[in-house]
Amino acid sequence: MKPGRVIGRVVCSQKYPDFKGERFLLVQPTDWKKNDRGEPIVCTDAVGAGYEEFVFYIESREAGLALGEKEPPSDASICGIIDGVDMEDEVWK
């Protein structure tokens, strides 16, 4: 699982049939302190995340598994919304 921040959405006029009803969000990968890392990626949304929310996502084959029985060919999926991180006597919210 990797942390990131939702920075936008992706709208498609045509998409693979198994993606019917799925939302695509643009996610800026971050570290656990919310510092940007790398280029933004497109993720399918399995949890109903919103703009600027701190989320975690998974990549590779597991990304499709997060979307239920139909398992569309997704490279990355948002699997959770992070409310806070508590590490080594520091708390970020």
Image: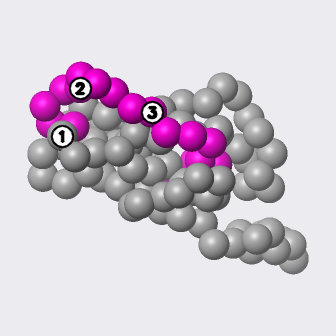
Residue drawn at (22%, 46%) of the image: 21
Q: Residues within 10 Å of mark 1 (few under 14, many from 20)?
A: few
Residue in view at x 63 percent, y 58 percent: 54
The span from disc 2 to disc 1 (Cα, nearest Å) is 8 Å
The residue closer to the viewer here, 5 or 91, is 5
Is 75 covered by the magenta stretch?
no
- The amino acid sitting under disc 2 is Lys
Residue 71 position in % (x across, y down):
18, 43
Label 3 neighbourhood size at 10 Å, few (<14), some (14-19), many (20+)? few
* Number of the label disc, if any, that sits on residue 15: 2
The residue pinned by badge 1 equals: 20
Residue 76 showing in the rendered view: no
What type is the residue that disc 1 sits on?
Lys
Q: Does the magenta stretch include residue 11?
A: yes
Is label 2 in contact with label 1 (beta carbons under 8 Å)?
yes
Residues in magenta? Answer: 1-19
**Residue 40, percent from left and from top:** 61, 30
Residue 62 falls left or right of residue 32: left
Give yes or no for contact between labels 1 and 3 (Cβ–Cβ under 8 Å): no
Label 3 vs 2, first from the N-terminus: 3
Disc 1, SS: loop
Q: Which residue shows up at 60% across the image and 66% down it?
A: 82
Q: What amino acid does circle 3 point to? A: Val
**29 shown above or below 15:** below
Q: How far apart are marks 1 and 3 (CA)?
A: 14 Å
Q: Position of residue 76 (x, y in %)?
A: 42, 38
Mark 2 crowdedness (10 Å alpha carbons): few <14, some 14-19, many ≥20: few
SS type, badge 3: strand
Front residue of 36 and 26: 26
Residue identifier under label 3? 10
Residue at position x 69%, y 72% in the image: 84
